[in-house]
Image (spheres, rainbow, N blue to C red):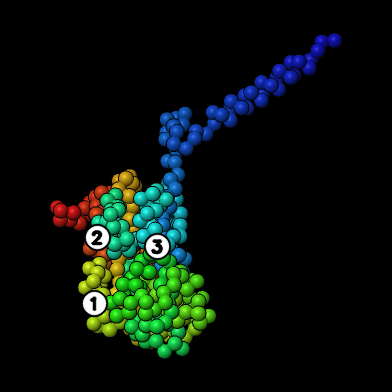
């Protein structure tokens, strides 16, 4: 009898071999050309944006930016990373940990020029894409403490934000301006969430936040404990503004926080979206375009970004150079910059 097993076995081997070949030569990989010569989808590029602790404004603003950019560009996905704030974000960009980061203008200016905490270590590759919102000095204290002004903090205990964060630096600077030396007050480096819990429990008597208002951590504190915003006098504000050219006078409107019945005068600073100069110009151009086109959407996403309703806010009075991709976008849409920029 003729043996039919071997031909059948060879037939099945042939089928398996053909199937493997078919699988290997099927859909081309992302970024390759298909058989008909058409280019397939661009490879997905993942970017990370550095923010700050989740109780402040940088984190929700960074999340809104990440969601916006990811939704408008099919080949981009932006992730959000918490950090200790602006100084850490400068280092994160320099060291390649972050592709983008939110950085307060005073820290960005100090980093670029190599002053303050960056003394002797200038970050000359730091570039701005746009101003996104304003960080504003908020001192909050339970009503039960009897504190009314920032200068009343002498002899008391307060949370001032993570060590060397923009909130920490602004708090210490403002206390000096109102006549309080560090030896006259007990300052602890807690984030807004943990700091708020310490205030709520009575272990601390005040907390400072330097972020866009309303600051979620302070809102939560005021919802659980009757609180008031501490005020600066006119003379104290003048002293603060003269000491730092990047700060400007502003107001926290009444009703910003639970129980707040009056406007509170304070100071603020722009917060910038920054990148390294090495970032691809076309990529930065497109990110800038997305931000500009979505200004009305962003201003509604978080109250702190309402300044974006004024387009000039994005590119004016910025202490570090604009990235070439961002500058090209602004110029292409009709903005003229001085030749020295």
For the N terminus, the quadrant is: top right
For disc 2, the neighbor class at 10 Å (few under 14, some 14 to 19, many from 20) is some
Residue found at x 27% / y 51%: 124
Label drawn at residue 299: none
Label drawn at residue 239: 1
Label drawn at residue 319: 2
Q: Is residue 309 left or right of residue 336?
A: right
In this orientation, does residue 313 appear? yes
Residue 179 percent across, percent down from the top left = 29, 80
Residue found at x 54% / y 31%: 26
Specify the farthest residue to the right. 1
Observer-nearest residue: 309 or 217? 217
In this orientation, does residue 250 appear? no
When asked about the image quadrant of residue 151, the answer is bottom left
For disc 1, the neighbor class at 10 Å (few under 14, some 14 to 19, many from 20) is some
Helix, strand or loop at disc 1? helix
> Separation of disc 3 and disc 1 at Cα?
25 Å
> Separation of disc 2 and disc 1 at Cα?
21 Å
Mark 2 and mark 1 lie on one chain; the one further toward the N terminus is 1
Mark 3 and mark 1 lie on one chain; the one further toward the N terminus is 3
Residue found at x 41% / y 55%: 49
> Separation of disc 3 and disc 2 at Cα?
18 Å
For the C terminus, the quadrant is: bottom left
Q: Which residue is mark 3?
A: 85
Which dot, 3 or 1, sits closer to the camera? 1
For disc 3, the neighbor class at 10 Å (few under 14, some 14 to 19, many from 20) is many
Residue found at x 40% / y 62%: 85
């Amino acid at each position: 009898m003729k043996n039919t097993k071997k031909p059948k076995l060879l037939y099945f081997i042939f089928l398996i071999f053909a199937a493997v070949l078919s699988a290997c030569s099927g859909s081309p990989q992302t970024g390759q050309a298909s058989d008909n010569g058409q280019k397939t989808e661009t490879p997905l590029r993942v970017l990370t944006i550095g923010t700050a602790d989740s109780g402040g404004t940088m984190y929700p603003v960074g999340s809104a930016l990440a969601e916006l950019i990811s939704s408008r560009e099919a080949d981009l996905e932006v992730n959000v990373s918490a950090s200790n704030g602006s100084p850490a974000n400068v280092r994160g960009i320099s060291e390649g940990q972050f592709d983008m980061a939110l950085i307060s203008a005073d820290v960005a200016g100090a980093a670029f020029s190599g002053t303050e905490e960056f003394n002797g270590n200038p970050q000359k590759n730091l570039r701005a894409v746009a101003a996104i919102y304003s960080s504003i000095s908020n001192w909050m204290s339970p009503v039960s403490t009897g504190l009314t002004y920032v200068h009343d903090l002498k002899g008391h205990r307060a949370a001032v934000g993570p060590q060397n964060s923009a909130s920490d630096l602004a708090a210490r600077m403002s206390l000096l301006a109102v006549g309080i030396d560090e030896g006259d007050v007990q300052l602890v480096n807690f984030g807004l969430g943990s700091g708020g819990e310490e205030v709520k429990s009575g272990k601390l008597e005040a907390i400072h936040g330097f972020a866009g208002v309303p600051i979620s951590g302070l809102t939560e504190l005021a919802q659980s404990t009757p609180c008031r915003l501490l005020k600066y006098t006119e003379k104290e504000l003048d002293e603060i503004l003269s000491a730092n050219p990047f700060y400007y006078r502003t107001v926290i409107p009444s009703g910003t926080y639970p129980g707040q019945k009056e406007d509170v005068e304070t100071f603020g600073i722009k917060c910038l979206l920054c990148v390294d100069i090495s970032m691809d110009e076309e990529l930065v151009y497109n990110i800038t375009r997305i931000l500009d086109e979505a200004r009305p959407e962003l201003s509604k996403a978080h109250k702190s970004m309402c300044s974006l309703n004024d387009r000039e806010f994005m590119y004016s009075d910025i202490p570090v150079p604009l990235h070439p991709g961002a500058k090209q976008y602004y110029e292409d849409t009709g903005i003229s910059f001085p030749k020295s920029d």
